[in-house]
Amino acid sequence: MENLNVTTIKLGKDTKKMLNHFKEHKSESYDEIVKKLIYIAGTAKENPKLSSKTVKEIGAARERMKKGEFFTEKQMEKLLGI
């Protein structure tokens, strides 16, 4: 977690289950998921067409990840020469 100032919130088991469906990878934190959802909600309010595109892109990215079509952090570092 990037910030040491954290808080605890209570979620119903069904809410937690729903949040799990938004995970793009196993190690993704609930903080990251909530931030992603807040971004999507804000975008939907400001620009509904862009929001629809964003949701589709997230869905496509999730499908690619399920198929194993992604680079690991180490692979990207090597590719970028970092």
Image (spheres, grey):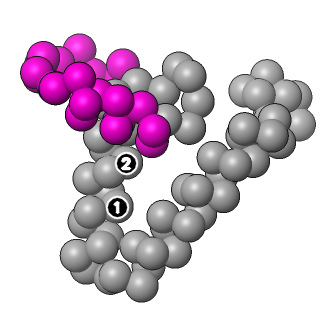
- Numbered badge on residue 65: none
- Numbered badge on residue 40: 1
Quadrant (top left, top right, bottom left, bottom right) of the N terminus: top left
Q: Is residue 20 left or right of residue 71?
A: left
Main SS, magenta residues: loop
| Residue type for callout 1 | Ile
- Identify the residue at image location x=32%, y=57%: 39
Q: Is residue 79 left or right of residue 27?
A: right
Figure disc tally: 2
Quadrant in the rendering for residue 20: top left
- Identify the residue at image location x=58%, y=56%: 59
**Part of the protein shown in magenta:** 1-22
Residue 45 lies within the magenta run: no
Quadrant in the rendering for residue 80: top right
Residue 36, x across and y down, in percent? 37, 48
- Above or below 45: residue 28: above
Quadrant (top left, top right, bottom left, bottom right) of the C terminus: top right
Cα distance, mark 1 to mark 2? 6 Å
Residue 14 lies within the magenta run: yes
Residue lying at the far front of the rendered structure? 14
Circles 1, 2 touching at the beta carbon (< 8 Å)? yes
**Which element is circle 1 on?**
helix
**Which element is circle 2 on?**
helix
- Identify the residue at image location x=79%, y=22%: 74
